[in-house]
Image (cartoon, coloured by chain):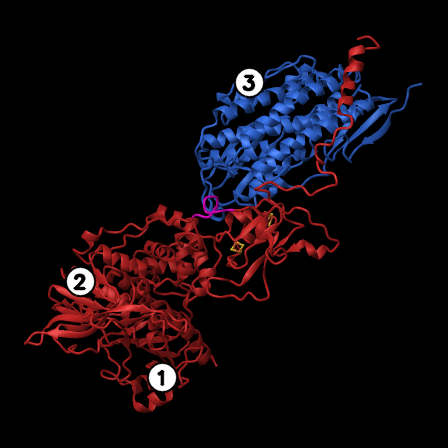
Chain colours: A red, B blue
């Protein structure tokens, strides 16, 4: 190369052609803020009404940039922790993982990217509060198609509808290991469900154990505060699932089925004992008498026995379990399952006197005097009659009694056309049981199907099995033949009328719409009630009963400090898990009371 | 009388446009007699941090291994997890990934144009190429939501599909760049100053190439035709038609010519990608990230970055966290052992230019 290279000197002068051109990156003069792209990851925005404070955004943030904080004016409620995310813009890297895992879709990133302040605290940014109008500039969003949440539940294998009605075989078949792991791994461990569970079971913890393949740990965690978990795993009313964060945009995690899966891996009472490996405190010489071996009584008994108390239960029936034994059909809760769970409870030292009715075989006073404290978990053994003309007919009965007798192994003549009146789980149970005896079954309900308090899966199950549902029908009369036997039920069609006070719509009978349904049996499933005849007058006054239920304080203690109570005879929710929660609370209170 | 060597320190504040590191030089006059590199100013423990992150969270750290070219890092992470987890990527996802990787290669080389010329005092080139790189960053912003850290390729595919009209914008940008590359040639390659400062400077002796584990444009600038995209094709590179340019000189000039040619090849690849890209899914969803367990196993995957081969080793012990993650970048050997071995005999004024030409990237050296 020569010293003076003409080409090499002239060609670079091509740069001159750029002379006077506008710079690429600064297009608008005077300067205008550049609009970011449509999926730009700028400052956060949160729709505060949609957000449920699950904290998943905070959990996923690998920069620990999100704290969950209380905001004025936002209170916690069922399904909402009341907390909201606050982002430290000094830590955030705008990866938007928080957006991708937000189950409600309330969180997004916006097109806003310029943020200048002299106040270092202002880097703590509460999305939605600090940019109330941020919704207009949302850019990086995670809709259902993009979300990293798994919105679809693993379907539960079940017997076919036609197969089911042939026997009392369990309808739900249970998840296998792989299905359980997959279903468990949908959970985001937010714990919103725990708050709603009456017993505050440690749901995220046991689901996490299942997801990571530690079924035994799951069983142990479950037994922390529930000694009848397999029962709950099969028939719980699972209010937890109603508030599941994933259910805000998809199917809730199958919390109940996962509990069922875990407990079923402990196939026998012995195995349960081995896995739970309970730590039983040395006997402390104190005694507790328990009336009723239902869920509340068994729970109090189990945890008291663990704490070293000498516990004896008095049970009127031949088997323990109370309403879960006699009120729930065997295709939902097989007898072997209950036997296993109760066998385990007995194995840690709980004594149960069966076929011993308090007030008949032994007096309340005797129990009261014999034990240091008494717990009553007596349930609601009686059912409301229909209360219409003709309900004394042969073949007119209470669904709850009917279920009791069938579960006790008795025969009940129902003929071939059954009408069940009611919309709760008892109504559905009685209907499906009757189907299994070959009857044609109709459910008559005052309101709409959507208003039925029964579990939606039970309603679907009943329909699959051929149960016919007539909504908006108000029974008025039971017809009988000359031998006094039911021949049919008469009802009026109803229309739904909005409630002026904002309550749920009421059914109002339409005059002249009388219809008669042929029937060989009519079953009322409109509620149960207590029977407190076992209590002598002097106790009844002290213990106090109001509106058909014992009055207790927050420790399950009645007006007589030595007497505690729980279960259906105390709380209005009247489900097994509330009864278990009562038993668990009572155990702690009794322990406290007797340790004074 | 023998002259005494003087010690001078280059860095640690950006010796060139390389990231913070230092080279301790012993010089006599203008000539280097020995060189010792010193790193440690940028250690962020990304590999270690991965062990505390779950399989999704780790992906957001990957881009930070190398600031100007984050996409190959995301790619190896995603592919290593896919390999252990047995996770397939839909065809469209693979094409999109290649488009991203090649756009990233162009952006990196444009950055290199700036660095290489800047280190020689030729600043106009840098202003042009950084300005033009911004057009690519615009594309990234539209596609991924981020300009520099894209966080876009993750296990199972890519995060979002192409936005409406995106490929047209890419094609328009490529046409523009192709025109601009001619200007670059005039301003840079035809420039006698550039030629004089680079020809015969920073020679990597061919006999040391294997010993130092040299890769990428440095390897190809020494006449060896090796490129992971061809040697061990990943994504859809085996379906694309492109050349692997080489040069013989093994000096800064030769490596510059290789990089120049690679930009043209990348443009060629992206056009084919747009042509061939199938419609359909772009992502196979992984399980809930908080509970995602990757089965026990390990995987080593490689990608050809703008600076050469990047290898990534991932180990899972069957939990929700990686057990170990390790990245072996091109810069590691180039900017430490190789640099130390070729600096003696060179002029002080050329050190930055040599470092740039070796593809030095301090953030990638320190993981
Ligand atoms: S993940 Fe979404 S719903 Fe949950 S707290 Fe964060 S912003 Fe709210
Ligand atoms: S964008 Fe990423 S770094 Fe920022 S708060 Fe969300 S998860 Fe954390």
First to last magenta residue range: A142-150
Is residue A145 found inside the magenta-colored segment of the image?
yes
Q: Which mark is residue B242?
A: 3
- Between the residue at mark 2 and the residue at mark 1, the CA separation in whole angstroms equals 37 Å
Mark 3, Cα crowd under 10 Å, few <14 / some 14-19 / many 20+, is some
Depth order, front residue of B309/B47: B309
Q: Is residue A513 above or below residue B11?
A: below
Q: Is residue B174 above or below residue A285?
A: above
Seen from this angle, which residue lies furthest front?
Answer: A512
Q: Is residue A245 above or below residue A452?
A: above
Q: Kindly identify which chain the residue marked by label 3 belongs to.
A: B
- Between the residue at mark 2 and the residue at mark 3, the CA separation in whole angstroms equals 74 Å
* Secondary-structure class at tag 1: strand
Q: Is residue A171 left or right of residue B349?
A: left
Mark 2, residue position? A441
- State the residue at coordinates (51%, 62%): A81
Task: Find residue A161 and report its horizontal and vertical position in percent.
Answer: 21, 53
Mark 1, residue position? A546
């Amino acid at each position: 190369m020569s010293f003076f290279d003409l080409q090499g000197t002239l060609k670079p002068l091509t740069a001159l052609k750029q002379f006077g051109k506008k710079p690429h990156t600064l297009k608008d003069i005077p300067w205008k803020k550049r609009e970011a792209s449509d999926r730009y990851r700028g400052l956060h925005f949160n729709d505060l009404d949609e957000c449920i404070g699950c904290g998943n955004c905070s959990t996923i943030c690998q920069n620990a940039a999100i704290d969950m904080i209380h905001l004025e004016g936002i209170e916690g409620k069922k399904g909402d922790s009341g907390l909201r995310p606050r982002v430290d813009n000094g830590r955030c890297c705008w990866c938007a993982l928080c957006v991708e895992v937000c189950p409600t879709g309330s969180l997004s990133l916006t097109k806003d990217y310029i943020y200048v302040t002299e106040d270092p605290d202002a880097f703590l940014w509460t999305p939605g509060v600090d940019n109330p109008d941020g919704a207009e500039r949302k850019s990086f969003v995670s809709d259902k198609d993009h979300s990293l949440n798994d919105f679809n539940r693993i379907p539960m294998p079940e017997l076919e509808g036609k197969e089911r009605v042939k026997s009392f075989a369990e309808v739900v078949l249970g998840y296998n290991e792989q299905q359980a792991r997959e279903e468990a791994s949908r959970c985001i461990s937010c714990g919103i469900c725990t708050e709603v569970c009456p017993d505050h079971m440690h749901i995220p913890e046991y689901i996490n154990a299942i997801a990571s393949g530690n079924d035994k740990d799951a069983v142990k965690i479950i037994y922390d505060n529930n000694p009848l978990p397999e029962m709950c795993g099969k028939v719980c009313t699972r209010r937890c699932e109603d508030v599941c964060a994933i259910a805000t945009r998809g199917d809730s995690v199958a919390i109940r089925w996962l509990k069922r899966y875990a407990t079923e891996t402990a196939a026998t009472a012995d195995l349960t004992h081995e896995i739970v490996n309970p730590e039983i405190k040395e006997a402390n010489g104190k005694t507790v008498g328990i009336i009723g071996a239902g869920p509340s009584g068994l729970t109090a008994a189990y945890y008291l026995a663990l704490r070293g108390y000498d516990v004896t239960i008095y049970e009127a029936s031949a088997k323990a379990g109370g309403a879960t034994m006699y009120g729930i059909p065997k295709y939902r809760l097989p007898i072997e399952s209950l036997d296993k769970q109760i066998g385990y409870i007995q194995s840690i030292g709980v004594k149960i006197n069966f076929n011993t009715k308090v007030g008949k075989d032994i007096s309340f006073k005797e129990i009261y005097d014999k034990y240091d404290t008494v717990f009553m978990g007596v349930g609601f053994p009686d059912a409301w009659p229909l209360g219409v003309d003709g309900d004394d007919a042969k073949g007119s009965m209470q669904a709850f009694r009917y279920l009791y007798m069938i579960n006790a192994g008795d025969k009940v003549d129902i003929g071939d056309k059954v009408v069940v009146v009611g919309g709760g789980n008892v109504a559905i149970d009685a209907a499906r049981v009757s189907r299994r005896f070959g009857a044609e079954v109709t459910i008559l309900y005052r309101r709409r199907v959507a208003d039925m308090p029964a579990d939606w899966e039970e309603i679907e199950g009943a329909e699959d099995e051929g149960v016919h549902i007539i909504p908006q029908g108000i029974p008025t009369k039971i017809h009988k033949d000359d031998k006094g036997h039911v021949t049919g039920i008469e009802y009026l069609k109803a229309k739904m009328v909005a409630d002026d006070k904002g309550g749920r719509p009421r059914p109002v009978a339409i005059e002249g719409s009388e219809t008669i349904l042929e029937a060989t049996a009519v079953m009322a499933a409109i509620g149960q009630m207590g029977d407190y005849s076992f209590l002598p007058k002097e106790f009844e006054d002290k213990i106090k009963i109001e509106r058909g239920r014992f009055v207790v304080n927050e420790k399950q203690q009645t007006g007589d400090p030595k007497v505690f109570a729980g279960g259906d005879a105390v709380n209005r929710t009247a489900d097994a898990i509330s009864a278990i929660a009562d038993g668990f609370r009572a155990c702690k209170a009794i322990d406290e009371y007797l340790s004074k | 009388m023998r002259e005494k060597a003087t010690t001078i320190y280059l860095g640690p504040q950006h010796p060139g446009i390389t990231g913070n590191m230092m080279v301790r030089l012993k010089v006599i006059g203008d000539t280097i007699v020995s060189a010792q590199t010193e790193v440690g100013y940028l250690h962020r423990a990304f590999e270690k941090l991965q062990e505390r992150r779950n399989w999704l969270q780790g992906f957001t750290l990957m881009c930070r291994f190398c600031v100007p070219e984050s996409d190959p890092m995301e790619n190896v992470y995603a592919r290593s997890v896919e390999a252990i987890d047995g996770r397939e990527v839909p065809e469209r996802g693979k094409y999109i990934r290649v488009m991203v990787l090649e756009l990233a290669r162009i952006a990196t080389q444009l950055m290199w144009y700036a660095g290489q010329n800047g280190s020689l005092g030729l600043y106009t080139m840098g202003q042009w190429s950084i300005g033009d790189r911004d057009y690519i960053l615009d594309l990234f912003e539209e596609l991924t939501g981020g300009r520099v850290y894209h966080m876009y390729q993750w296990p199972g595919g890519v995060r979002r599909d192409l936005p409406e009209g995106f490929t047209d914008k890419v094609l328009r940008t490529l046409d523009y760049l192709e025109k601009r590359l001619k200007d670059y040639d005039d301003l840079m390659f035809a420039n006698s100053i550039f030629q004089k400062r680079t020809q015969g400077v920073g020679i990597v002796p061919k006999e040391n190439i294997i010993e130092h584990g040299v890769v990428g444009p440095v390897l190809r600038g020494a006449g060896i035709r090796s490129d992971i995209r061809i040697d061990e094709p990943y994504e859809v590179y085996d379906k694309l038609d492109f050349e692997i340019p080489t040069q013989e000189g093994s000096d800064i000039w030769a490596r510059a010519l290789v990089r120049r040619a690679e930009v043209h090849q990348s443009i060629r690849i992206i056009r084919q990608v747009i042509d061939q890209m199938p419609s359909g899914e772009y992502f196979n969803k992984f399980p809930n990230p908080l509970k995602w367990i990757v089965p026990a196993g390990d995987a080593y995957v490689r990608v050809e970055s703008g600076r050469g081969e990047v290898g990534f080793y991932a180990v899972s012990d069957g939990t929700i966290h990686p057990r170990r993650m390790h990245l072996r970048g091109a810069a590691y050997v180039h900017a430490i052992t190789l640099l130390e071995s070729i600096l003696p005999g060179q002029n002080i004024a050329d050190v930055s230019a040599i470092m740039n030409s070796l593809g030095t990237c301090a953030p990638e050296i320190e993981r």
